[in-house]
Image (cartoon, coloured by chain):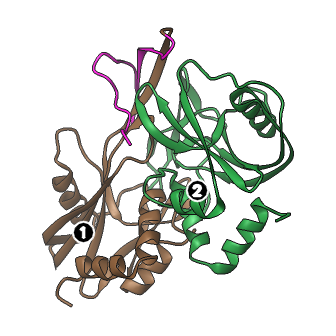
Chain colours: A green, B brown
Amino acid sequence: VVIMKIPSQAKRVFEGKIFDVYQWEQEMFDGSRQTFEMLKRPDTVQILAIIGDKILTVKEDQPNVKNRLGFLGGRVDAGEKPLAAAKREILEEAGLVFSDWELFKIYEPFRKMDWKIYFYIARNCRKAAEPIWDSGEKIKSKKLSFDEFIKIYSSEKYLGGDFGADLLRIRLDKKKLKNFKKKLFPFS
Amino acid sequence: VVIMKIPSQAKRVFEGKIFDVYQWEQEMFDGSRQTFEMLKRPDTVQILAIIGDKILTVKEDQPNVKNRLGFLGGRVDAGEKPLAAAKREILEEAGLVFSDWELFKIYEPFRKMDWKIYFYIARNCRKAAEPIWDSGEKIKSKKLSFDEFIKIYSSEKYLGGDFGADLLRIRLDKKKLKNFKKKLFPFS
């Protein structure tokens, strides 16, 4: 599968707070031309943070969304590397520093949008500072065992699309399940 | 989980070919105010079309995406009901008329976008016309058995996010699997 990209000749026709809109002329299979449209938004990071034998998850209230299951993370700033964004976010949000990082997977959830979600595994944690919560967020953190984590985050309660589907594929395959557990907890 | 909605006081700040952008002032938990942004796009329909003991699926080339697995379907026009759109699309695309329709599920794949995907099951088929293919699409149709369908559309090859995850949950549960098969093929 080839994911659609915004072509270099596309013009930015709108610049928003989060979303920019691009348009371009596209030649169709029959030779006719149409205006195509795609969106671009900042990439984001999500962190599977390992603390002891648990995985740090969050349940988040935002002004318009209640009880959203997820992970610590956030937007990658302009010019920032995704890994740097992940380290910054988890320090800002939870006051935690991790010394062992691994990229788990990059998701591109929406075909007509230039948006990558980087999922990282963060291991070897130490507390570095007090957490600073964003004004618009109410986050409750919860540490889950591997079994709790894989059950909850592969259920319908977690609206994580492709990551949720990957967890389900891991659950369906004993070998994948063992390897994934080893990836999260290499020394247990 | 409460899905975010575009509030009534939001202003449309951009009107695109597919995507409209809305913004509004949102009071945060600490009393400060921020500009929030959401997108709106036409809803779409996807059809699980049953033909005999098979499910009609498609593999689609678009000018910028190759070999995308999916189903017949398309956009709901302004003022059109989703079911009417589904009937129109399958007649236009495949020249088929179905007399027995059931809404399987409505997905809202993207939190910051007002976009619903209606998945319908269509049964009791007759051929009505020759298919008319869109100038920008190259669609190859493929009829799959239930076992082929559930295997392929719950694999990583199908980038169907929440529907793919639902198929995986169905595969994980023998009772759900039986019920889903009965829903697609009630008379077999």
Q: Nearer the viewer, residue A172 or B52?
A: A172
Q: Which residues are magenta?
A: B1-30
Where does residue B57 sit, x and y in percent of width and height?
38, 73
Residue on which disc 2 sits? A163
Q: Do tag 2 and tag 1 residues touch (Cβ < 8 Å)?
A: no
Up/down of B186 relative to B128, above or below: below
Up/down of B58 relative to A108, above or below: below
Please give left or right for residue A116 compared with residue A124 in the image.
Answer: left
Residue type beneath disc 1: Ile
Q: Select label 2 or label 1 by which is in front.
A: 2
Work out which residue is located at the far left of the displayed protein and give it: B99
Q: Secondary structure at mark 2?
A: helix
Q: CA distance from mark 2 to mark 1?
A: 26 Å
The answer for which chain carries disc 2 is A
Quadrant for the C terminus of chain A, please.
Answer: bottom right
Q: Is residue B129 visible?
A: no
Where does residue A102 sit, x and y in percent of width and height?
81, 52
Residue type beneath disc 2: Phe
Where does residue A5 sit, x and y in percent of width and height?
62, 46
The answer for which chain carries disc 1 is B
Residue on which disc 1 sits? B121
Residue B104 position by quadrant: bottom left
Q: Nearer the viewer, residue A1 or A53?
A: A53
Q: Is residue B85 visible?
A: yes
Q: Secondary structure at mark 1?
A: strand
Assess disc 1: are there few (<14), some (14-19) or many (≥20) residues with their C-alpha within 10 Å of its C-alpha.
Answer: many
Where does residue A69 sit, x and y in percent of width and height?
51, 45
Work out which residue is located at the far bottom of the displayed protein and give it: B188
